[in-house]
Image (cartoon, coloured by chain):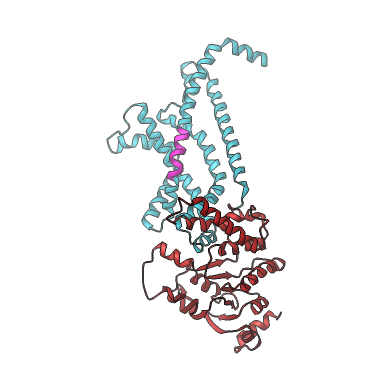
Chain colours: A cyan, B red
Amino acid sequence: MFENFLLWFQQNLPEIKEVMLSLNEGFLKSLEIFFLTLLGAVPLGLVIALGSMSSIGLIRWFNKIMVWIIRGTPLMLQLIIIYYGPGIILDNNWWGSGAAGRFIAAMIAFILNYACYFSEIYRGGIEGIPKGQYEAGEVLGMTRSQIFFKVVLLQVVKRIIPPMGNEVITLVKDTSLVRVIAVYELMWNGQNFIKSEGIIWPMFFTGVYYLVFSGILTVFLGWLEKKMDYFKV
Amino acid sequence: MAILEVKNLKKNFGELEVLKGIDFSIEKGDVMAVIGSSGNGKTTLLRCINFLETPNEGEIIVNGETLFDASQKENASERDIRKKRLHFGLVFQNFNLFPQYTVLGNVMLAKELLEKERPDYKQNKKQIKAEIEAEARKILDDVGLSDKLDFYPHQLSGGQQQRVAIARALALKPDILCFDEPTSALDPELTGEVLKVIKSLADSNTTMIVVTHEMTFARDVANKIIFMDEGKILEEGSPEDIFENPRHERVREFIGGIGAI
């Protein structure tokens, strides 16, 4: 079997080269979506989390309803609505017709979607900190922000690493959804070979990229969890 | 002059009146034990004194300075409240140590944050930090934990954790150190080591208010006892007054019920 594979490899070397180049390019786009989403959604999630815990009813309900809508509908639908919505509803296509516009629309959908999921994880983490921690800080004369940054934050981080890890791994695979508005990422490029060359193996091969990348992330997350093992919450 | 005066302190939680007018005063060096069965406002009293709850009525006066007066609706800034708080220290039933800091870190943290506000902090940073650390080490030595400085809270027994909590409160040199049932979460063996620390503080003239169910301890260490019942002080006096000649049947029952006297 291995010999057969070797033979096929040798015979198809130019084609394989072409496929790998294309998949690499797509994978770079997937990585870009992945990292930009985290960069935006990690802080935005905190804003939404604080909003949904606000003492002001209007802010709290606004955030809660947004989280409900975003978590209650498919990300794929959100991509479609954000990309096509302005043109159809407002009769004004903000995104233009180029790839850059499609990419921005995709990023907005992803950041908003992931921020809402993260916000619920943060909220759980923050609300899970015992009241005694805040009170201990207060009677020691700390300010509210000192209590948050010096006492509470690291405990929250420790608590949320496992559920955040889950979301981050999901995000790796969710990046493939952007092809619904024709952003050319890894899976789009793989799928493209079915149409252009009539070969399906590049599509299968995209799985290796996802697996390797999520494998690296899993190792990293495990390391991070271990780093936090020095204290218990 | 009394170091602490509490006048007509009242606190409601909704319809529920938890404190129905508490008056007492203590002098410097006093150790006041607050006793009485659970649910009669002892903890709420401590929490009001430590500004964790806002009383509905009454005054709190420390060294002649009115720290709180419910009739004066002032919008105290966070800074002011913090300054007022620092007259008091509070040791909790559940320790509430900061889990991500070592023993030494727990004791130093609040003091470090406070000293950062000194105008000369930036120039003398190293020296100030060294002073804070030396002081923290000394206090931890006093409570018998000099061999645990680099341990994290979860690596300590309950009794050790509570002693760290006491050291943490002492690091800010409060005028009055309050204890909210400091040994209720500990088994009898560990209770002893914590009570020993509190007793040594009493011997070195630390002013303290101790809410406790340890009657023997209250009798032997406190010089003043108040018995709380249904949100009021039913009886107050010296340990002899309370334990040997209680005026109220309720107090007699409570102490009799404890048995071990």
Of A84 and B93, the residue lying toward us: B93
Name the quadrant containing residue B149: bottom right
Name the quadrant containing residue A130: bottom right
Determine if residue B98 is in view.
no
Determine if residue B156 is in view.
yes
Q: Is residue A229 above or below residue A215?
A: below
* Count of marks, rendered view: 0
x and y, in percent, of residue B1 in the image: 48, 80
x and y, in percent, of residue B212 in the image: 61, 74
Residue bounds of the magenta highlight? A33-44
Going 51% across and 18% down the picture, which residue do you hit? A19
Q: Main secondary structure of the magenta part?
A: helix
Q: Is residue A36 left or right of residue A203?
A: left
Of B87 and A184, the residue lying toward us: B87
x and y, in percent, of residue B251 in the image: 61, 84
Q: Is residue B131 above or below residue B186?
A: above
Q: Is residue B221 left or right of residue A145?
A: right
Report if residue A39 lies within the magenta region.
Answer: yes
Q: Is residue A224 above or below residue B92?
A: above
Report if residue B7 lies within the magenta region.
Answer: no
Question: Residue farthest to the left?
Answer: A91
* Quadrant of the drawing holding the C terminus of chain B: bottom right
x and y, in percent, of residue B62 in the image: 47, 74
